[in-house]
Image (cartoon, coloured by chain):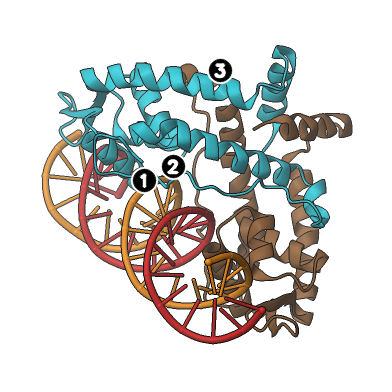
Chain colours: A brown, B cyan, C red, D orange
Amino acid sequence: MNTGEGDPTVPGPSQRLNAQVAGVDYGVLDELVGYALRRAQIRIYQDFLETMAAWSITPPRFSAMTLLDANAGMKLTELANAMGIARSGAVQVVHALEKLGHVKRTDSAVDRRAHSLALTASGTAALRSIRRAIKQHDERISTRLSEDEKKELRRLLDLLG
Amino acid sequence: MNTGEGDPTVPGPSQRLNAQVAGVDYGVLDELVGYALRRAQIRIYQDFLETMAAWSITPPRFSAMTLLDANAGMKLTELANAMGIARSGAVQVVHALEKLGHVKRTDSAVDRRAHSLALTASGTAALRSIRRAIKQHDERISTRLSEDEKKELRRLLDLLG
DNA sequence: TATTGTTATACTCTATAACTATA
DNA sequence: TATAGTTATAGAGTATAACAATA
């Protein structure tokens, strides 16, 4: 797979079974909010990867691109904070996106230590397609929920943690 | 950290910020059910790791132990299917749990290729404590939800994917 | 031939710690 | 001294592919 344009590959779809298997006793797992979340995530992750395979895009890469699109000129540390990861992790994400030609660094005028991060023209174009595909993916995974239910789900999720 | 009783270490808590940062435009991310899920998971994961640090237990390890407790004698392939991961991944989880002394293999009487997996006595004892801590963790992360809301959240999550 | 467990390999994601250049 | 970015290192989690033993 991976029609993609670069080295950074993606975990690979897999023909893995559904998270819940008949005839198996899931014990306390079935009572935990956290495990319901995890199970949903496991299911959804499959569709996400398949949706993004052609672009070599992973969840953190999509987050980074979206953040840079909406906040052009962010510094690396700001990006890391916004994503909730360590700086060293942000370096890797940015590096992968640079290899894909989606992100460029510009030396900051004010602070010679810092770089200004932004999407390239082709990165912006790619993000348009990616975003469209992601929106479809998001529709797909939540197709059994009404608009009200989606809203309620988001509300309840935001109360968590 | 890691008062734990074995080599297999755990990612490490970290003093990372919250997933949502003020002054940053999250763009389309704020509209996606999938990202709300991801964000909640990121927040919760911190508490999970801190809760489990003393036991060197990770989410998949907890799932495996719970499944083996409720379905003693499972084969490796069955465990992998129940967890929704590849066999090779299950090998690693089982291996880590063996190193911790929580799981034992017994040669299957019927099929000489297969092993019968089960918790050890100390694994069962450990699971009791671990389960108690996990339940508290689950209460903690969902403390802002009423019982009805928790139930509704589980229902909506199960509709996803 | 098909399945079971295993190993080899590869990749992402994440973290901490130490380093360099600047502030 | 403190911050920005980077690199080195490490481990978890996941996957595919190939292999030996057994079915």
- What residue is shown at x 49% (from left), y 44% (from top)? A16
Q: Quadrant of residue A111?
A: bottom right
Location of residue A49 in the rendering, given as x and y in whole percent from the top left corner: 60, 55
- Can the viewer see residue A18 in this picture? no
Give me the disc on residue B85: 2
Residue A119 lies, in percent from the top left, at 75, 75
Q: How many marks?
A: 3
Q: Is residue B43 above or below residue A23?
A: below
How packed mark 1 is, by other alpha carbons closer than 10 Å (few <14, some 14-19, many 20 or more), is some
Residue at 23 percent of width and 35 percent of height: B98
Q: Identify the image quadrant of residue B150.
A: top right
Report the Cα–Cα distance between label 3 and label 2. Answer: 21 Å
Secondary structure at numbered mark 1: helix
Q: Residue B11: image x %, image y %?
A: 42, 47
Q: Chain of mark 3?
A: A
Question: What residue is disc 1 on?
Answer: B89
Other-residue count near label 2 (Cα within 10 Å), few / some / many at <14 / 14–19 / ≥20: many
Using the image, tell me which numbered label, if any, was put on residue B51: none
Check chain identity for marks 2 and 1: say if they share one.
yes
For discs 3 and 2, the disc positioned in front in the rendered view: 3
Which quarter of the rendering shows the N terminus of chain A? bottom right
